[in-house]
Amino acid sequence: MSPSDHAFVFIGGLHRSGTSLFAKCLADHPATAGFHDTGVPEDEGQHLQSVYRKASAYGGPGKFGFAEEMHLTETCPLITDANRAKLWSEWSRYWDLSHTHLVEKSPPNLIKARFLQAMFPNSCFIFLLRHPVAVAGATKKWKRRTPLDKLVEHWTVCHEILRDDLPHLKQAMVLHYEDFVRQPTRVLEETFRFAGLQPVEAKREIRRNVNDSYFERWAAWRKEFFAGRAIRRAERLYESRLNSLGYSVVEPRSERRSPWSRVSD
């Protein structure tokens, strides 16, 4: 079989944005195949190929988006027939090719979609956004020496890149993690239809209100000396940019005003 025999579903979103759970929900569909039991972190496709560099080459979670080299588009010199065949060969060994739709999830897909579309034109893209306070708080567990304001900056930079890339994508959907955990049945049904699949019932447990603990921790950190200084820097430097993306670090629990829309042909 060749890539033209399949539809590709690429999932992107920063680390700790719920992409792993979401990808598993999509891969549960009887017409889809995802990666599993690969032996690499979260069965991410970025770790199962040698065509482009992984996020870890540029600092990993909370940092990779700062590297200009991580943002790949249709002008990337890596787009060649040889690399397309190589990427297909490396990934296809982990997919069940008897399925029509092939799912691949990696956080850097958030800023690589234009490249992936050029490599595999029969693709659609699903991006998950999670509140920057929750992402920063969750990522802080891995990046203890990285100030909170730098984690917020990374969230902002990556999603500004995505916003600017969306008009170049033929078929893309932006979902909010908060909507997914609040109404998983509705969101998954919409997603399946978007990908050209008949909706099926979700099989996995999906917890609601998972951001609350991070909001509470953020408020507690704001009262601390060093963490509080970092949070106030984030408020001063990035709040207006975050507002344009539909979020706030000044009032994390405020009602979101989403500027994002689905793009499709």
Image (tube, rainbow, N blue to C red):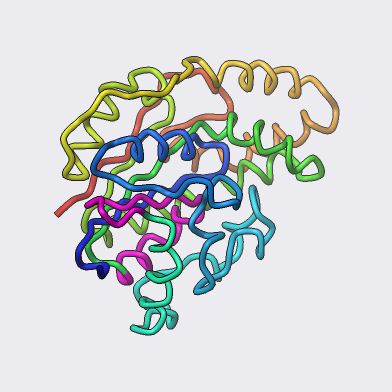
Q: Nearer the viewer, residue 122 or 28?
A: 28
Q: Nearer the viewer, residue 96 or 197?
A: 96
Vertical arrangement, residue 39 with respect to residue 49, above or below: above
Q: Is residue 20 left or right of residue 139?
A: left
- Taking the magenta stretch, the answer to whether it contains residue 212 is no
Residue at the spot x=64%, y=48% of the render? 62
Quadrant assignment, res 174: top left
Vertical arrangement, residue 1 with respect to residue 30, above or below: below
Residue at the spot x=50%, y=15% of the render? 209
- Taking the magenta stretch, the answer to whether it contains residue 104 is yes
Number of numbered discs on residues = 0
Location of residue 235 in the rendering, given as x and y in whole percent from the top left corner: 62, 34
Location of residue 238 in the rendering, given as x and y in whole percent from the top left corner: 57, 41
Q: Is residue 173 left or right of residue 180?
A: left
Q: Which region of the structure is painted magenta? A: 96-119
Residue at the spot x=65%, y=32% of the render? 138
Location of residue 214 in the rendering, given as x and y in whole percent from the top left corner: 63, 22
Q: Is residue 188 left or right of residue 247?
A: left
Residue at the spot x=20%, y=30% of the render? 199
Vertical arrangement, residue 23 with respect to residue 180, above or below: below
